[in-house]
Image (cartoon, grey):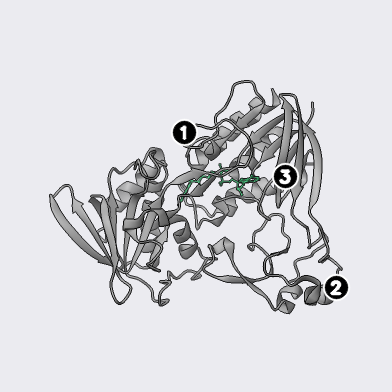
Amino acid sequence: MKPVLIIGGGISGVTTAVEIAEVGKEVILIEKEPYMGGNVVKFNNYFPKLCPPTCGLEINFRRIKQNPRIKYYSSTEVQEFSGVKGDFKVKLKSTPQYVKNNCTACGKCVEACPEERPDDFNYGFTKTKAIYLPHEMAFPYKFNIDDKYCKKESCNKCVEVCEYNAIDLSAKEEIIDIEVSSIVVASGWNSYDASKIENLNYSTSKNILTNVEFERFIASNGVGENKILRPSDNSEPKKIAFVQCAGSRDENHLPYCSAICCSASLKHALTIQELYPKSEIKIFYIDMRVAGRNEDFLVKVQENKNIELVKGKVGKISETENNNLILEAEDILSGKKIKYEAEMVVLATGIMPSDINLNLNKDQNNFITDLQNDGIIPVACSRKPMDVSSSVKDATAAALKAIQ
Ligand SMILES: Cc1cc2nc3c(=O)[nH]c(=O)nc-3n(C[C@H](O)[C@H](O)[C@H](O)COP(=O)(O)OP(=O)(O)OC[C@H]3O[C@@H](n4cnc5c(N)ncnc54)[C@H](O)[C@@H]3O)c2cc1C
């Protein structure tokens, strides 16, 4: 049997790869970013057990490294494909690999590099040098050079200090031709663009973050390193509000429910309370949708006197002179209009399927649909929103479909 191609190295792609390889079949796993792990690797922790993301991913990375049946390529995408189930011809395109595999990640190049770039791992809230390690648990554990900011041979400082000759600034992009039997699409999700929800003023107010950005604000290896810092003045906010369904279940934005945002905000509220027990948190929601073990979070939140759940959709957020935020909503249960002043706001934006530039079958919301027997198998969040444990189960099912 020809190998199976897996597009996307998030939790679902990585799990599918390991499941296929461990029953003896060949796998080619590609990831467009320089590191595997997808969205989960950027989280502070993940429910239901609230373990750090590396705790689940690291075991899988080790299984990938040890398994000769898995070939993996980071910074790589599909350029084009043709063929039918059992016999696909695929062209892969890898961005130039300026840093070679003999890089030991000693870090001397970083000290020498004079250029800076916004750190996309922290959504641009911090900076790295133009040569950088994506994050401290990155897999592959290798430095990377950002084309847009590196001055290449005209600077050359990183090359001069590298004792291992591991940097080649003249590297070119690479095209790799492969033949595969089936294609698993594990391309996952992106966050809804909050700037489109004009009444919530995300683009004009620095202290309004999205939920994915907030993950980096509470992560111990994130923006504030165990402190939540307001972007406007680096102060530690004590009054934080969450706006659920920011753009979700709304015909003008995302008509569907993303299934995980309520649990994510409950998780966030409890983390804030751990960091700042005296903080005041309000969660504005339409319906609180949590299921299974995540109901425990809801109970914990309901029992916490510093967290208030307000049933009401936020209609407007405006900014005060000192960069606080005024949220306006109707409290449905009391029938009263309320205005609440918070020091920071987190928008629980929903998830959208990643924009994958291939001619695949999609539903009205751009999620990839499974055509029985066409050899292209969408998995996890590329086909509908779901949490990690459902993604892992879906990945096992995709592995079975692919090897059949
Ligand atoms: C704020 C927030 C908090 C959350 N917290 C939790 C939590 O605590 N617990 C939980 O269970 N779930 C949580 N989730 C849900 C969780 O993020 C998803 O279940 C999980 O990310 C699904 O994994 P995935 O592999 O399908 O997708 P992703 O994590 O999106 O991974 C997809 C991968 O594919 C890559 N890719 C995309 N397009 C291409 C392409 N064309 N070529 C190559 N590679 C490509 C991407 O770069 C990415 O690495 C949360 C979601 C949100 C929004």
Image x and y of residue 288, in percent: 30, 44
Q: Earlier in the sequence, mark 2 or mark 1?
A: 2
Label 1: element kind: loop
Looking at the image, residue 16 sits to the left or right of residue 238; the answer is: right
From the Cβ of disc 2, is ligand 1 less than 8 Å away?
no
Q: Which residue is mark 3?
A: 64
Q: Residue type at mark 1?
A: Gln
Q: CA distance from mark 2 to mark 3?
A: 28 Å
**What residue is rendered at 53% in x and 62% in y?**
123
Image x and y of residue 45, in percent: 49, 55
Q: Which residue is at the front of the view, 256 or 222?
A: 256
Image x and y of residue 238, in percent: 32, 70
Q: Which residue is mark 1?
A: 364
Q: Quadrant of residue 129?
A: bottom right
Q: Residue type at mark 3?
A: Ile
Label 3: element kind: helix
From the viewer's perspective, is residue 327 above or below residue 108?
Answer: above
